[in-house]
Image (cartoon, rainbow, N blue to C red):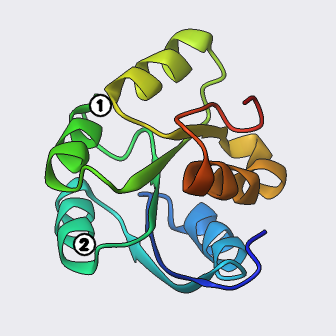
Amino acid sequence: MPEQPLSCVLLADRHHGLTEGVRGLLATAFGSVVMVADVASLLEGAGRLQPDVAVVDLSLARDSGLGWLRAVRQRCPDLKVIVLSVHDEQAVRRAAMEAGADAFVLKRAISTDLLAAVELVRGAPATEAGKP
């Protein structure tokens, strides 16, 4: 966990129940947590707020594609992006990383892996959370 709060994290997920729990966890490491629920708000918020990190559900877009990740990379190339997913398949992880994610965290492991992934993306090259 960071020694001092970071300025801002953007949390993007369509599932409000999960988002509230993740928001509480991220609030321990960031000065502010801004929540959005769709791709348009993610892109607008990333451009306007210039957050330190974006934590985004892999299935944020209704089409289940990774176009949103490529769009974030074009708009904010220096933004650290952590992808959350329920999918544990290696092909899914690889696709997210190749599309521009800095880290990948399984939703079932958020409580143990998310803050570690935040630390990894702040000081290490693109990696899968917990596996340097």
Quarter containing the N terminus? bottom right
User: Where 25 falls versus 71 (above or below)?
Assistant: below
Instruction: Mark yes or no: residue 62 visible.
Output: no
Question: At 57% from the left edge and 50% from the top edge, which residue is drawn?
Answer: 121
Q: Please tell me which of labels 1 and 2 falls first in the chain.
A: 2
Residues at marks 1 and 2 touching, judged by CB atoms closer than 8 Å: no
Residue 25 found in image quarter? bottom right
Residue under pointer 1 = 66
Q: Identify the residue position indicated by label 2 in the image.
A: 45
Kind of residue at badge 1: Leu
Q: Is residue 98 visible?
A: yes
Q: Position of residue 96 (x, y in %)?
A: 43, 27
Quick check: 53 left or right of 26? left
Q: Could you classify mark 2 by the number of other residues whose Cα lies within 10 Å: few (under 14), some (14-19), or many (20 or more)?
A: some
- CA distance for labels 1 and 2: 18 Å
Give the amino acid at mark 2: Gly
Q: Position of residue 104 (x, y in %)?
A: 58, 36
